[in-house]
Amino acid sequence: MLQAVKYDSEVKTAAFGERTITIKNLTPVLPPKERETRKREIEQRLFDVFSKYANGRRG
């Protein structure tokens, strides 16, 4: 059975010219072990992407 994931919500409002923009950030609430596992996965994928493009740079 799948458990419903709960989210922490953060709302920010910013003025952009004459407009007001509202940004809602949702962060999943995870057990510490799963949070660390996901963090490591994200860090590894980001490292792979940045390494790929950094190696292609010349001069």
Image: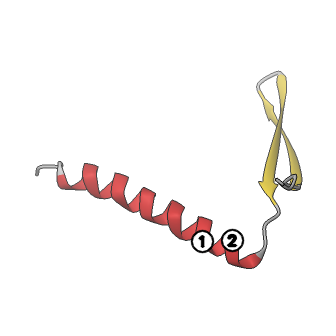
In depth, the one of 16 and 25 nearer the eye is 25
The residue indicated by pointer 2 is 34
40 sits to left or right of 50: right
Residue 16 in the image: above or below residue 7:
above
Q: Amino acid at mark 1?
A: Thr
Residue 7 in the image: above or below residue 29:
above
Secondary structure beneath dot 2 equals helix
- Residue displayed at 82% across by 53% down: 2
- Residue displayed at 38% across by 62% down: 47
Q: Position of residue 32 (x, y in %)?
A: 74, 77
17 sits to left or right of 54: right
- Residue displayed at 10% across by 51% down: 59
In depth, the one of 3 and 54 nearer the eye is 3
- Rate crowding at label 1 as few (under 14), some (14 to 19) or many (20 or more) other CA atoms within 10 Å: few
Q: Do residues under tags 1 and 2 come within 8 Å of each other at their CB atoms? A: yes
Residue 16 in the image: above or below residue 2:
above
Secondary structure beneath dot 1 equals helix
In depth, the one of 34 and 18 nearer the eye is 34
- Residue displayed at 86% across by 56% down: 3
24 sits to left or right of 37: right
Q: How many marks?
A: 2
The single residue placed furthest to the left in the displayed view is 59
Q: Position of residue 16 (x, y in %)?
A: 76, 29
How far apart, in angstroms, are the residues tagged by discs 1 and 2?
5 Å
Residue 45 in the image: above or below residue 39:
above
The residue indicated by pointer 1 is 37
- Rate crowding at label 2 as few (under 14), some (14 to 19) or many (20 or more) other CA atoms within 10 Å: few
35 sits to left or right of 6: left
Q: Quadrant of the N terminus?
A: bottom right
